Image: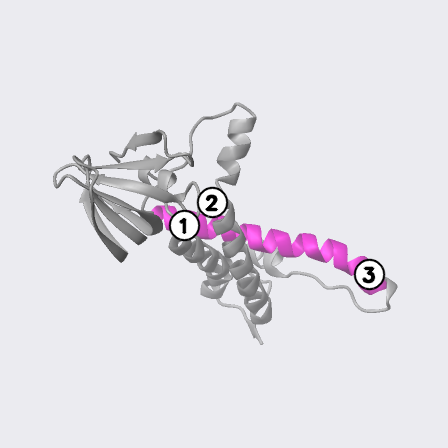
Amino acid sequence: MIINELTTRLIALLLPGAIAASITDTLTVHKKWDNFRFLLNAVLFGSLTYSLMQAALYLINPILEYSGYQRLSICFWAAILDTKSQVHVGEIIVASFAAIVLGFINSACVQKKAIFRIAKNLHVSRKFGDEGLFSYFCARKSPQYVWVRDKEEGITYAGTIKDFSAAGTLRELTLVDVEVYSTETGDKLYELERAFLPFTEDKFIIEIPKEDEETSEEEEVGS
């Protein structure tokens, strides 16, 4: 099936890119994208998807020719540059599936801070990401055993981070296998299988105890 409308030419670029951008937006922790940022990422991911497909054909076509089969080609680039060229729907479908894979790979790279780690090793930047320090702190190790001290209530929650989120000034943690202590006396109050802890900025402290539990690494979370 072949379609020649200008709208389809835009979809050919934006649909695979929008898929990859949506996956990345959903699976990663980052500052909220506005419409322009999402559109820009969709165009970039779309271009990258077709570029990777083209690169794959450069590797596959010699094998096809050697085996006596016809060479494969991508019509997308010609269709973008020449309005008289045709866009193949099957090509868009293949690109969309490729974009799904690209979205998951990119999400993994973002979560692992791959670019920032490379930049740090090259002494280019010390930036750790776009999100706040809270998200970086909670995601640094999985599973992460922590002490969460509620400064207002004088209670300490000891448990393993299961989930976390940050929206505006609100910070949310879900801990599992929780033990609750009095911060002042250190007395154990009770145990919980799971605890959901919503906090606002500067109202709590997260500590990571050392394995020997002689001292603890303390980081006060603000934003």
Residue at the spot of label 1: 28
- Considering the whole magenta stretch, tell me its main secondary structure: helix
The 10 Å Cα crowd at callout 3, few under 14, some 14 to 19, many 20 or more, is few
Q: Amino acid at mark 1?
A: Thr
Residue at the spot of label 3: 63
Q: Amino acid at mark 2?
A: Val
Residue 58's image quarter?
bottom right
182 or 151, which is in the foreground? Answer: 182
Name the residue rendered at 51%, 37% in the picture. 115
Q: Is residue 59 magenta?
A: yes
- Mark 1 secondary-structure assignment: loop
| In contact (CB < 8 Å): disc 1 and disc 2 | yes
The 10 Å Cα crowd at callout 1, few under 14, some 14 to 19, many 20 or more, is some
Residue with the most extreme bottom position: 1
Residue at the spot of label 2: 110
For the residues labelled 2 and 3, the Cα–Cα distance comes to 34 Å
